[in-house]
Amino acid sequence: MSEKTPLQMTIAQALNRAHHQILEAEPRAIVIGEDIVGGAGLDGKELGGVFGVTAGLASRFGTSRVIDTPISETAFVGMGLGAAMTGLKPIVEVMFCDFIGVCFDQILNQAAKARYLSGGRIDVPLVIRTTMGAGDGSAAMHSQSLHGLLASVPGLSVVCASTPSDAAGLLKSALAAPDPVIMLDHKGLYGMIGDVEADLPAVPIGRGRLVLKGSDITLVAIGEMLVRATKAAAQLAERGVSVEIIDPRSIQPLDTDMILTSLEKTKRLLVVDEGPSYGGFADRVIAVAACDGYSALSAAPQKLTPPHTPVPYGRLLEAAWLPSSEAIVSKIDEMMYEE
């Protein structure tokens, strides 16, 4: 089979394949985290953690490169930071982004600032993989989406993939970067299936993806919200409303050129995001439109986010808390009459 022949695989499978390719090609690459070996399944193979992303790595590359750690984010993120500063290329898995609070000093005050404080003498090729997203009843401390918070820290790059090919490609680009990259996977999308080239080409950090061309309104979304936005756009298209959808892929740096170019055509902007309504990623995108694309706008840019509360545990409350496809349709209907 040619390496350019598309394969069908899930996001979890694409990430697993990317890990295998990275460790095979780069002898300095290591993987660190709790439960990344995760015991054996019914077939005797390594489970590879809660989501199966690191399955088979330890048996193939050994436990000196695939390091299953105790439950201490402070310790193993610090371990990854030290490894990166001394010549290795660590991929550190933090099971849920909620747990980044435990190791935030290592990220905020150490990893993000090491190059600056060393006058550019120290590279920090550290990749931190973690998960985000509500919708599966995991409650307030396992369901947050902290991409906006992390993107506000100078010195960090933050990426969020929404397709199998982007997940694998962004991981490869993250490992090649000289500075820390935090990669957030939406845990509700690990089973999403898509076309992936066998060689998993790198996806540039800082470049968005045009998901759908349209002429009436620009809609920016990532993760599960992108899935809901696409569904909403299909419903609106039946009524003659043409929605242009942008998947930023990279939260920081943000592809502002793609967003502003789209606004020149559509004149309207809606950002649908699972992050906080106050000071989150949606506010960042709206600021770009208001400051740099003001002359193109024919109506005020809008956002659709959850209420500014913790994620509810009850399934009905959680479903009501998250922006739905129906809510997106209703919001765009409302915006189309604004001038």
Image (cartoon, rainbow, N blue to C red):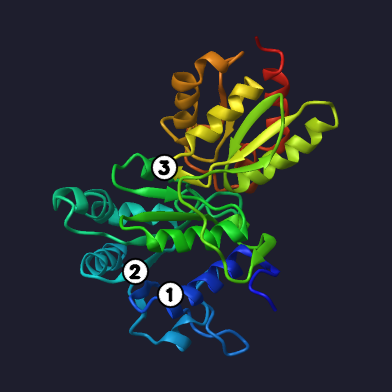
Residue 316 percent location from the top left of the image = 66, 43
6 is higher (above) or lower (below) than 20 = above
Across the whole image, how many numbered discs are drawn on residues? 3
Q: Nearer the viewer, residue 319 or 12?
A: 12
Q: Nearer the viewer, residue 38 or 79?
A: 79
Q: Earlier in the sequence, mark 1 or mark 3?
A: 1
Residue at image coords 47%, 41%: 310
Residue 238 lies in quadrant: top right
Quadrant in which the N terminus appears = bottom right
Q: Earlier in the sequence, mark 2 or mark 1?
A: 1
Residue at image coords 58%, 84%: 41
Residue 70 percent location from the top left of the image = 32, 74
Disc on res. 90: 2
Tell me if 59 is positioned left or right of 135 in this view. Answer: left
Secondary structure category for the residue under label 2: strand
Secondary structure category for the residue under label 1: loop
Disc on res. 177: none
Disc on res. 253: 3
153 is higher (above) or lower (below) than 101 = above
57 is higher (above) or lower (below) than 32 = below
Amino acid at circle 1: Asp
Secondary structure category for the residue under label 3: loop
Q: Nearer the viewer, residue 98 or 304?
A: 304
Amino acid at circle 2: Pro
For the residue carrying disc 3, how many other residues have a C-alpha within 10 Å: few (<14), some (14-19), or many (20+)?
some
Amino acid at circle 3: Pro
Which residue is labeled 1 in the image?
Answer: 35
Tell me if 119 is positioned left or right of 284 in this view. Answer: left
Mark 2 against mark 3, which lies toward the viewer?
Answer: 3
